[in-house]
Amino acid sequence: MVFALFGAGLLVWTTTRVRHGRPVAHGVSPVASVTVASVAAVVALALGAWCLTQA
């Protein structure tokens, strides 16, 4: 459940930052930071879903 909550929270936070035109990470390329954050969020969501289906 923790992975799913983290992934969902990170995805919402990243989307909110991008929609308001704010940087996701300071000192990093905007495209790279959005990409890395989005991939991490999707991986965490997938891992959370997998863990929940194994129980």
Image (cartoon, grey):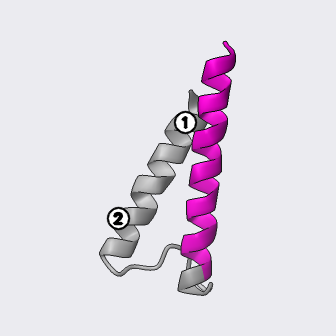
Mark linked to residue 17: none
Q: Is residue 27 left or right of residue 15?
A: right
Q: Which residue is mark 2?
A: 16
The residue at the far top in this view is 55
Q: Residue type at mark 1? A: Ala
**Residue 22 at x, y = what percent?**
39, 79
**Residue 23 at x, y = what percent?**
46, 79
Q: Main secondary structure of the magenta part?
A: helix
Badge 2: few (under 14), some or many (20 or more) residues near its Cα, within 10 Å?
A: few
Report how far apart the C-alphas of labels 1 and 2 lie in the structure.
18 Å
Q: Residue type at mark 2? A: Thr
Q: Earlier in the sequence, mark 1 or mark 2?
A: 1
The residue at the far left in this view is 20
Query: Which residue corresponds to the image point at 63% horizontal and 20% vertical from the top-left?
Result: 53
The total of numbered circles placed on residues is: 2
Badge 1: few (under 14), some or many (20 or more) residues near its Cα, within 10 Å?
A: many
Segment colored magenta: 32-55
For the N terminus, which image quadrant? top right
- For mark 1, give the secondary structure: helix
- For mark 2, give the secondary structure: helix
Vertical arrangement, residue 7 with respect to residue 21, above or below: above
**Residue 47: which quarter of the image?**
top right
Residue 50 located within the stretch drawn in magenta: yes
Vertical arrangement, residue 22 with respect to residue 53, above or below: below
Q: Which residue is mark 1?
A: 4
**Residue 45 at x, y = what percent?**
57, 42
Query: Which residue corresponds to the image point at 58% horizontal and 51% vertical from the top-left?
Result: 42
Query: Which residue corresponds to the image point at 32% horizontal and 73% vertical from the top-left?
Result: 19
Asked if the residues shown at circle 1 and circle 2 are in contact, with their CB atoms under 8 angstroms apart, the answer is no
Q: Is residue 14 left or right of residue 4?
A: left
For the C terminus, which image quadrant? top right
